[in-house]
Image (cartoon, helix red, strand yellow):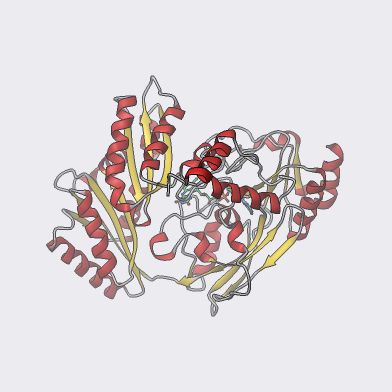
């Protein structure tokens, strides 16, 4: 092992590798911020160094965990004391902004917020945005196919990618830095790596699509008495908003009341309390035109009784306040002795039934359980927080209730955060054994030694239950289809 670290230091130089007690000065993962454990942290300065490190580790079967900003929420960067972290922190360059072709070429360690700021200077927008923007990297966002705000009109990370440069486990460089919208020349290999959570290759560069920078926003908080009113409102804004609708974020009353504390003044503007609160936003180029469209669309919606009450943001500061309520989570963490978060997808029309059923099952487990819900409703994505006081129920029992209820609705156990270690036991609740088997075969093909983030997303070997289920499906057909 000493020999391996010596050879890696020869490739990277002493500033390119962190070893010993300096490793523990960094934090482990987002949910478990204990000191990081790792044999070393590699910090290549360029793709050539990174290829050389992978080639060497592949030869000796050394496990490597690709690392971006470490803001992932699924324990996908968890590391043992025998593993080596492969950090992209020295590969942050924004290499080229093509304002005619509307794309940007970045190194994978570039921080999202910096990419956003740099392209804004060219009157362009990189449209994926999320709360971790100050720390998360383009490579990590690609590896988790991150979503966040704006998916409704721009899509997730996958939709932004024109080209990728990736290094395979054995050090082979796959440079597919395509910058064309249209390129059907053979298989679209980049799709394999997007959302693969560092298990199939290390992303080193990306060519990302850009949009014209919007110059106008119109934002409102609306209230509703029923879920059917909310979905009718979504359909109305979608149909009559002329493509300007870019956010439709729904907050259930339980979430709203928990997180409104710091904004009580704003809450008093509503005449009463409601079961649902919706943050809607339009974006466009001309303030006057956009405001007129926004107000006319809302007026029609009000006449058709598609919402009850409205607060329209009168300033940028007020718009930020509306978003701050939607992004808040500190109050719930203070209030409960333990919270557990979930990020799921399911059919929009079934969401309220699912939430009510889940709430009743959690209360059967613990009558004081509280379920807080908000979501990117238009994307079919809900974020659920379960809150408990002492004495605490078994966390796995809570997960089992959430995911088995979700399975009844054919939902997805991860909408945008990925599987990592956290959701690995539940992957089979939303993916069929044959799908997981194909994932394993791809993993084996691209990383035969199993050195890249092994044990994340799925185990390298199928469990006996999976083998039995596959055999049963082959005999009797799949009950899920
Ligand atoms: C406050 C907060 C808000 C968030 N909001 C959202 C949200 O709205 N929507 C959403 O989708 N997500 C959200 N996230 C989670 C989101 O997944 C991450 O913030 C981001 O996508 C991960 O980027 P990262 O650079 O921190 O990656 P890391 O956490 O470092 O890594 C994540 C995964 O990617 C792999 N990886 C990292 N870099 C590379 C690379 N170069 N090549 C190959 N694999 C790599 C890692 O091995 C790991 O599997 C949020 C997180 C936080 C903390």
Q: Is residue 324 visible?
A: no
Q: Position of residue 89 (x, y in %)?
A: 66, 52
Left or right? Give the position of 468 relative to 331. right
In the image, is residue 427 above or below residue 190? above
In the image, is residue 307 above or below residue 410? below
Q: Position of residue 411 (x, y in %)?
A: 40, 47
Report the front residue among 244 and 57: 57
Left or right? Give the position of 249 relative to 121. left
Q: Quadrant of the N terminus?
A: top right
Q: Which residue lies most toward the top here? A: 391
The quadrant in which residue 4 appears is: top right
Residue depicted at x 59% and y 32%: 34
Number of labels in the image equals 0
Q: Position of residue 229 (x, y in %)?
A: 20, 54
Residue depicted at x 38% and y 19%: 391
Q: Position of residue 249 (x, y in %)?
A: 33, 53
Report the front residue among 5 and 74: 74
Residue depicted at x 33% and y 42%: 373
Report the front residue among 152 and 338: 152
In the image, is residue 100 above or below residue 194? below
In the image, is residue 366 above or below residue 253? above
Q: Is residue 186 visible?
A: yes
The quadrant in which residue 195 appears is: bottom right
């Amino acid at each position: 092992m000493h020999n391996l670290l010596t050879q890696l230091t020869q490739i990277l130089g002493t500033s390119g590798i962190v070893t010993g007690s300096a490793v523990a000065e960094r934090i482990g993962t987002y949910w478990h911020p204990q000191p990081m454990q790792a044999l070393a942290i590699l910090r290549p300065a360029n793709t050539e160094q990174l290829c050389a490190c992978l080639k060497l580790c592949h030869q000796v079967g050394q496990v490597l965990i690709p690392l971006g900003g470490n803001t992932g929420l699924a324990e996908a960067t968890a590391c043992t004391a025998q593993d080596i972290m492969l950090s992209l922190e020295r590969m942050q360059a924004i290499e080229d902004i093509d304002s005619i072709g509307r794309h940007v070429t970045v190194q994978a360690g570039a921080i999202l917020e910096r990419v956003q700021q740099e392209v804004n200077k060219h009157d362009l927008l990189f449209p994926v945005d999320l709360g971790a923007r100050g720390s998360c990297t383009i490579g990590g966002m690609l590896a988790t196919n991150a979503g966040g705000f704006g998916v409704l009109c721009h899509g997730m990370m996958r939709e932004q990618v024109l080209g990728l440069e990736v290094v395979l486990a054995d050090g082979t460089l796959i440079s597919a830095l395509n910058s064309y919208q249209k390129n059907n020349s053979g298989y679209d290999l980049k799709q394999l790596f997007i959302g693969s959570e560092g298990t199939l290759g290390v992303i080193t560069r990306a060519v990302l699509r850009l949009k014209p920078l919007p110059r106008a926003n119109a934002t409102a908080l609306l209230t509703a008495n029923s879920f059917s009113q909310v979905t009718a409102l979504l359909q109305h804004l979608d149909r009559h908003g002329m493509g300007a609708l870019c956010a439709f974020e729904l907050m259930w009353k339980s979430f709203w009341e928990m997180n409104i504390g710091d904004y009580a003044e704003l809450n008093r503007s509503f005449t009463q309390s409601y079961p649902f609160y919706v943050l809607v936003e339009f974006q466009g180029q001309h303030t006057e035109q956009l405001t007129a469209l926004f107000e006319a669309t809302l007026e029609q919606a009000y006449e058709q009784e598609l919402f009850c009450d409205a607060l329209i943001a009168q300033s940028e500061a007020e718009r930020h306040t509306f978003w701050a309520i939607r992004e808040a989570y500190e109050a719930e963490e203070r209030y409960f002795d333990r919270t557990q978060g979930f990020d799921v997808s399911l059919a929009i029309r079934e969401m309220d039934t699912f939430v009510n059923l889940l709430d009743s099952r959690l209360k059967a487990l613990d009558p004081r359980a509280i379920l807080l819900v908000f979501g990117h409703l238009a994307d079919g994505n809900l974020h659920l927080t379960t809150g408990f006081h002492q004495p605490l129920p078994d966390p796995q029992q809570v997960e089992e209730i959430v995911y088995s209820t979700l399975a009844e609705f054919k939902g997805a156990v991860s909408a945008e955060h990925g599987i990592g270690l956290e959701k690995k036991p539940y992957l089979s609740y939303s993916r069929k054994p044959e799908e997981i088997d194909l994932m394993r075969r791809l993993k084996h093909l691209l990383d035969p030694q199993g050195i890249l983030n092994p044990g994340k997303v799925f185990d390298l070997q199928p469990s006996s239950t999976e083998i039995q289920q596959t055999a049963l499906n082959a005999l009797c057909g799949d009950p899920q289809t």
